[in-house]
Image: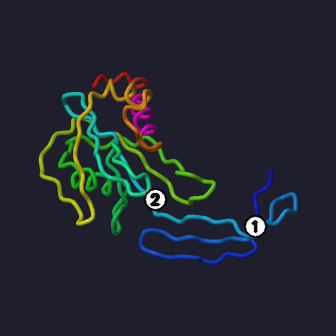
Amino acid sequence: MDKWKTLKSEYIHKSPFGNIRKDKCKLPNGIVIDDYYVNEYSDWVNAVVITKEKQIVLVEQYRYAGKDFFLEVPAGKREGNETHEEGLIREVKEETGFISLRKPIFLGEFMVNPATQNNKVITYLMLDAFKEFEQDLDDTEEINVKLVDFEEMGNLIRTNQINTQLFTANAYFMAKVFLTENLLKI
């Protein structure tokens, strides 16, 4: 297989939230797609945060495009020159008030939707978390913190009792595999 070739590229929309780019692409078989749209977004970090009491820290917030409230793992974009880890620690603290004295464990870095998006999600595991601060939310954020038994989380995802996004489910199952493979008891 060969990669596609970009023949032309132009921006349809640019904003601080993300950009929409229209490309003209030539496939290896010679077919040309005149209007291939790519959503350009910043990478983001997320974390499975597990308390000393073996609960996973989730955030519940309204998601406009989904027209509903969703439980998800804490996540967000890095700011300034932050490393992924620094951005993650800040986001978790701001959204939930939880911190950990243990260093976050890197679980993986994955494309969100490589068919139409250019961004990645970088996932970490935070163990022995505890609530130390009040939330420090942006003006556009309204977040409820929910604690769910870590072992029960998988059942809630599988039975759709937690109507979650793919990145939250993926983060949970990555953490579960990491903990099992490393024989860590939480």
Q: Is residue 53 above or below residue 23?
A: above
Q: How crowded is mark 2: few (under 14 residues within 10 Å), some or many (20 or more)?
A: some
Q: In which quarter of the image is the C terminus?
A: top left
Range drawn in magenta: 169-178
Instruction: Look at 19% across and 45% down and name the residue there.
Output: 98
Residue 66 relative to residue 98: left or right: right
- Circle 2: element type: loop
> Exactly how many numbered labels are in the figure?
2
- The type of residue carrying mark 1 is Cys
Residue 90 relative to residue 43: left or right: left
Q: Do the residues labelled 2 and 1 touch (CB within 8 Å)?
A: no
Image location (x, y in percent) of residue 164? 41, 41
- Circle 1: element type: strand
Residue 57 relative to residue 118: left or right: left
* Label at residue 25: 1
Q: Which of 106 and 61 is in front in this view?
A: 61
* Label at residue 59: none
Q: Which colour scheme is used?
A: rainbow
* Label at residue 43: 2
Quadrant of residue 3 in the image? Answer: bottom right
Q: Which of 100 and 136 is in front in this view?
A: 136
Per the model, the C-alpha gap separating discs 2 and 1 is 24 Å
- The overriding secondary structure of the stretch rendered in magenta is helix
